[in-house]
Image (cartoon, rainbow, N blue to C red):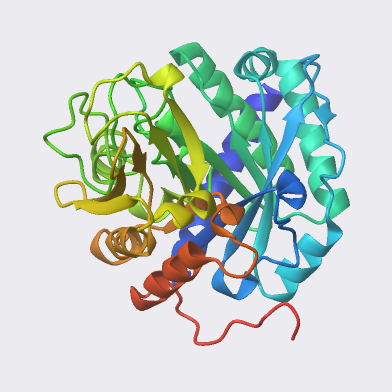
Amino acid sequence: MRQSMTRFAVMSLLLLSSTLALHGADKRLLAYYEFDDQTNIPPYNATNIPYHELTHIIHSNILPSPKADGTLEIPDGFLEPRLISRAHRAGVKVEVCVAGDANVFAKIVGDPDLREIFAANLQAFVQKHGYDGVDIDWEVPEDHKQAVNFTAFLQDLRALLPAPQYLLSAAVSSSPGSWGIYDFAGMTPVLDFYNVMTYDFHGPWTNHSGHNSPLFLSPEDPGQCGSLRRSIDNYLTKFDVPAEKLNIGTAFYGYKFLVANLWDHCECSGEAFSMTYAQVKPHIGKGWTRYVDPLASAPYLVHNTKPGFITYDDQDSTSRKAEYVIKTRDLGGIFMWEISQDYDGHSQELMTALYRAFKHAGGFHRTYRASPLE
């Protein structure tokens, strides 16, 4: 009874606060930032992030303990106080992302006592370290029971981290039903927004080469594996998620396949691997020819003399996505996985293109955003 009354009160406040918060708000340009980017070559850390080009950062990842007892596992080197201070100085919100083994998530949220412990530990972590909220990256709930339990956990967490003071979001599948089951009717009133993982449409798990994160679904795709547009349409119509609560993902990485061209058959689990944009960039025009698939609105590279196909996003495709998501579809925001992956030690071409297109599409309502060093 106590939990039922508490949840009813929380839900009533959520509906009011989310309505007030969404009217007149900026669109969101959100970045996932992985803590171990600090060990990249070249390294990427809180001093490299272009805060003035963002509205939100999701700091990735802490984990539920593998013991599935509701405690947290914090990787060595995760805490980076400069991230929070610089972001807040620029007016940027920072969420902490919790990700981990799907079976551990399922066990925790399936037990009411463990749910409460897990939520309380996340609340304590957020408040101790100055985060603005939590992003849950559970990949993925597999059935209706797990989906309902996930909603119950989110309600418990929201009761401890109330809106609008704290943000609560979830990274969710691009194709619910075929990958992941969610209780959208229960989740949507609780969450500030969803981060829809509209990438990995093709990769080592497919039986043919194809686009990693296409804007449109090509009728020539042998697997009809999906696109940003299809995911957006499904979330708006099939799952009844409000447009303002949708952030759509773009990729700062791609995949290399050992095939001769787009849509070629392959044993891809042994013939494809990921590449960051910074790794793809040196190939462009140097033994590889760039093409654009007009049906998918997606670029790709083909090797000039031997089998080799690379799916990736460039400045043009990234800009088109931002225009489509923000201006054409009027959604809540856009994000990328992952912010360091276009960094070459000097510049971030995709981040710059994304910001400029986002701004041109009307994403920022304010005319001035302070830099973190001002």
Residue 243 in sight from this viewpoint: yes
The quadrant the N terminus occupies is top right
Q: Is residue 47 above or below residue 229?
A: below
Residue 221: % across, % down:
18, 31
Taking the view exactly as shown, the residue that stands out farthest to the front is 305
Taking the view exactly as shown, the residue that stands out farthest to the left is 219
Q: Is residue 340 above or below residue 23?
A: above
The quadrant the C terminus occupies is bottom right
Q: Residue at x 54, y 39 (%)?
A: 170
Query: Which quarter of the picture shows residue 197?
Result: top left
Work out whether residue 202 or residue 172 is closer to the camera in this orientation and state it.
202
Residue 360: % across, % down:
35, 77
Work out whether residue 56 or residue 110 is closer to the camera in this orientation and state it.
56
Work out whether residue 286 or residue 62 is closer to the camera in this orientation and state it.
286
Q: How many marks?
A: 0
Residue 353: % across, % down:
42, 69
Q: Taking 370 as reference, is 22 left or right?
A: left
Residue 40: % across, % down:
71, 49
Residue 35 in sight from this viewpoint: no
Work out whether residue 171 or residue 223 is closer to the camera in this orientation and state it.
223
Q: Residue at x 34, y 52 (%)?
A: 243
Q: Residue at x 42, y 37 (%)?
A: 255
Q: Residue at x 61, y 41 (%)?
A: 10
